[in-house]
Image: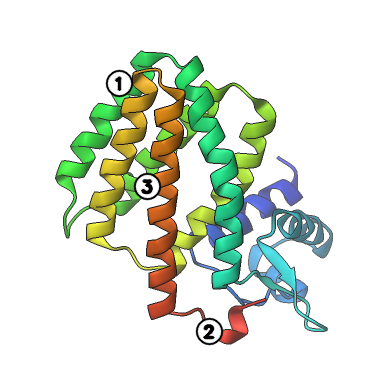
């Protein structure tokens, strides 16, 4: 693996898991020393991350981890709705029912286990596999590439916003509605169920960010 590729992967993961918070400085000297690499591959990695929208320039002060304002969230969800609703509709038309029947049982079981001691990493890994299955079933490589970019930003929102147990239970039921529609081969119902899920997810995130705003210096 090229050094720049490795550095890109490391920094991307740190941004997505919250190790590098919104607004965190990405000064070249500091990061190259921390990661044990020269500045050339670091610059290549940072350029890619800037293209992904995960890193932004802050006037005269170099690069920082991109912020997440309420406006950013709403704009992200406008794009997310256009892509995910279409993907669910295509998946329902083109799916292998067995794949989604298995996922439906896993999601149902995960929902029944939700509680204070739930390992949310496992829960989000499961919903990630559901997203990947929908993208694969949609069988449109351009749509799949666009969704990968959007979902990276969605993963960040889980860290910046607050996990809400009641919302997770609601989301599980919404995921089951989507899976039911895909298993049944109903593009219209899959689209409607996805639209409902995204509408409720956005409302929850807006409430969370309103109660726990990202510090002003973290916004771009």
Estimate the x, y position of residue 22 in percent, counting from the top left: 57, 73
Tell me if residue 116 comes above or below residue 207 in the rendering.
Answer: above
User: Observer-nearest residue: 139 or 93?
Assistant: 93
Q: Secondary structure at mark 2?
A: loop
* Residue at screen point 26% across, 42% down: 173
Question: Mark 1 or mark 3, which has the lower sequence index?
Answer: 1
Disc 3 packing (10 Å; few <14; some 14–19; many ≥20) = few
Question: Mark 3 or mark 2, which has the lower sequence index?
Answer: 3
Estimate the x, y position of residue 199 in percent, counting from the top left: 43, 53
Estimate the x, y position of residue 37 in percent, counting from the top left: 73, 60
Residue under label 2 = 215
120 relative position to 30: left or right = left
Q: Is residue 125 visible?
A: yes
Marks 1/3: CA distance? Answer: 19 Å
Mark 3 vs 2: CB contact within 8 A: no
Marks 1/2: CA distance? Answer: 43 Å
Q: Quadrant of the N terminus?
A: top right
Residue under label 3 = 124
* Residue at screen point 50% across, 28% down: 89
Q: Quadrant of the C terminus?
A: bottom right
Estimate the x, y position of residue 196 in percent, counting from the top left: 39, 46
Image mark for residue 101: 1
Q: Secondary structure at mark 3?
A: helix
Tell me if residue 46 comes above or below residue 191 in the rendering.
Answer: below
Marks 3/2: CA distance? Answer: 26 Å
105 relative position to 72: left or right = left
* Residue at screen point 55% across, 63% down: 73
Image mark for residue 209: none
């Amino acid at each position: 693996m090229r050094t720049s590729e490795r550095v890109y992967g490391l920094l991307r993961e740190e941004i997505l898991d919250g190790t590098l918070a919104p607004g965190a400085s990405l000064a070249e000297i500091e990061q190259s020393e921390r990661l044990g690499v020269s500045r050339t591959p670091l610059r290549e990695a940072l350029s890619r991350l800037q293209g992904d929208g995960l890193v932004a320039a802050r006037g005269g002060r170099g690069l920082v981890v991109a912020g997440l304002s309420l406006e950013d969230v709403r704009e992200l969800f406008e794009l997310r709705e256009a892509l995910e609703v279409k993907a669910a509709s295509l998946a329902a038309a083109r799916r292998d029912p067995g794949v989604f029947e298995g996922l439906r049982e896993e999601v149902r079981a995960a929902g029944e286990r939700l509680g204070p001691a739930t390992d949310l990493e496992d829960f989000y890994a499961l919903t990630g596999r559901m997203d990947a299955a929908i993208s694969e079933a949609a069988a449109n490589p351009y749509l799949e590439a666009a969704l990968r970019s959007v979902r990276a930003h969605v993963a960040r929102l889980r860290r910046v916003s607050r996990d809400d147990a009641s919302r997770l239970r609601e989301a599980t039921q919404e995921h089951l509605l989507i899976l039911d529609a895909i298993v049944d081969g109903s593009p219209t119902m899959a689209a409607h169920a996805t639209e409902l899920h995204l509408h409720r997810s956005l409302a929850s995130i807006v409430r969370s960010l309103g109660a726990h705003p990202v510090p002003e210096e973290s916004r771009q």
